[in-house]
Image (cartoon, rainbow, N blue to C red):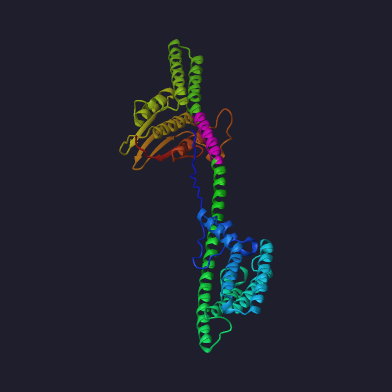
Amino acid sequence: MEGAGAVDTVRMRLSDTVPRAPHAPRAPRGRAAGGRWDRLRRTAKPSPDAEQADIRWAGFFAHGPYALLALATVVSAASAPVFMTSGEMYAAGGLVLVALAVEWRWSAIRAGVPEHAPAAQLHFALRTLVAFVLTWLNPLFSIYAVMGYFDAADLLPRRGARVGLLATAVTMAGSQSGGLPPASGMNWMLFGVLYVLNGSLCVVFTNIGVQEAERARQRLATIKELEDTNARLEQAMEENAGLHAQLLLQAREAGISDERRRIAAEIHDTIAQGLTGIIAQLQVVQSAAEPGLARQHLDRAADLARHSLGEARRSVHNLTPAALEHDTLPEALERTVGAWSDDHGVPARLTVTGTEEPLHDEVAATLLRIAEEALANTARHAAATRVGVTLSYMGDEVTLDIRDDGRGFDPHALPPRSRTGGFGLAGMRARAERIAGTAAVESEPGQGTAVSARVPLVRHG
């Protein structure tokens, strides 16, 4: 018999993307300008659309400052006769070159600058200052100053980002109120209102950005936790696969061992007992003086040999004992007890109690083999003058008791099993345990022996 267990495996793959903030987009710009988005992209494995958005924002942060500066310069130059004197025009031209130098320097070093590093903060401060002065000279240069709204959160730490946004709001409010410095009290009032409006919007959007960043961090933590869980599950599945293989091996070994015990018990109960009976009959023949008596024992020996051969073949194929092929268990026990009594000249009687039930083949075979082994032990060792066998149907179990009035023995002082014997009692227990039953032996020297087997009542299917 071979058994095997199965371990169901479940494989889970998880992937997710971190949504972008709709109001304050960030874009990857090397280590400094795009550190946060780089981490999101590496960890969250964004979708193709998100990757395209990252690429577009990367292009904006790489080329946007130059484009905004160029647009602001063209528009300011066109409006220069209205807003600027000749000296201011020259000053603005020089500051435009300074702004180009600032942007060129940042483009050259940004890939190697960590996020929120002093170099990034210095770049933001220089650009904001240059944009402020340019807007002072011509309000339309605020087109270039608006860049501070986009990258303050990436270039500056959290508190510094709010200061940077408020500083940018000063430049934008001055431009929107008609230029810096305000020319009249009305302009100052308008500047104050616009600054409050710009500053409030900066604070609101900053808070929203912080919340979005916090949600992004939580999503990243969740994704990391899910990845760790997935890794642990994969490791557990690998361990389960090894355990499954080990269990299969143990089940095969257990099946082989169980089959060996079964065959050993069958050989003991069929061939060994048959040979013992044949030897006993031949010994009688040797000492018999009358030819008729010798012939009678020879016939018994031949019958035993044929019966043992048939039982051996049935045991090899794990078939029901021949005695149960056409008879119920009580009928088979009746014939077995009767044959044993005739062979050994010892009175033996079978008693059946309770309501007879059709038993499962394995249950009936187990009880019959236990009875045969107990009777064989009685014949070999007990020197009994009377034997009683009782089969009892007791609701959900069946009991079999074999008692004799022989010499008895001490069950706790049995000799070790040898090659020539000692298998009977252990074999009976093993047979009963195979069908979730028990077998017990009670005996005392000079007080006879009682063998009791108790097994579940499993009806014939």
Query: 452 or 362, which lies in front?
Result: 362
State the residue in front, 388 or 304. Answer: 304
Q: Is residue 227 magenta?
A: no
Looking at the picture, does residue 274 appear above or below residue 233? above
Left or right of residue 197, residue 360 in this image: left
In the image, 120: left or right of 265?
right
* Chain part drawn in magenta: 245-265
The residue positioned farthest toward the left in the image shown: 355
Camera sees residue 197? yes
Q: Residue at x 43, y 32 (%)?
A: 371
Q: Is residue 252 magenta?
A: yes
Where is residue 440 shown, x and y percent of the image?
47, 40
| Residue farthest toward the top in the current orientation of the protein | 291
Identify the main secondary structure in magenta: helix
Task: Report how many numbered discs are placed on residues in the image.
Answer: 0
Q: Position of residue 38 (x, y in %)?
A: 60, 59
User: Which of the 4 quarters of the picture holds residue 145?
Assistant: bottom right
Q: Quadrant of the C terminus?
A: top left
- As displayed, is residue 365 above or below residue 397? above
Nearer to me, 233 or 353: 233
Residue 343 appears at what percent x and percent y?
43, 22
Q: Where is residue 125 shown, x and y percent of the image?
A: 65, 74
26 is higher (above) or lower (below) than 353 = below
Q: Quadrant of residue 172?
A: bottom right
In this rendered view, identify the residue nearer to me: 185 or 233.
185
189 lies above or below 344: below
Q: Is residue 145 visible?
A: no
Which residue does the image show at 53% across and 76% down from the upper left? 203
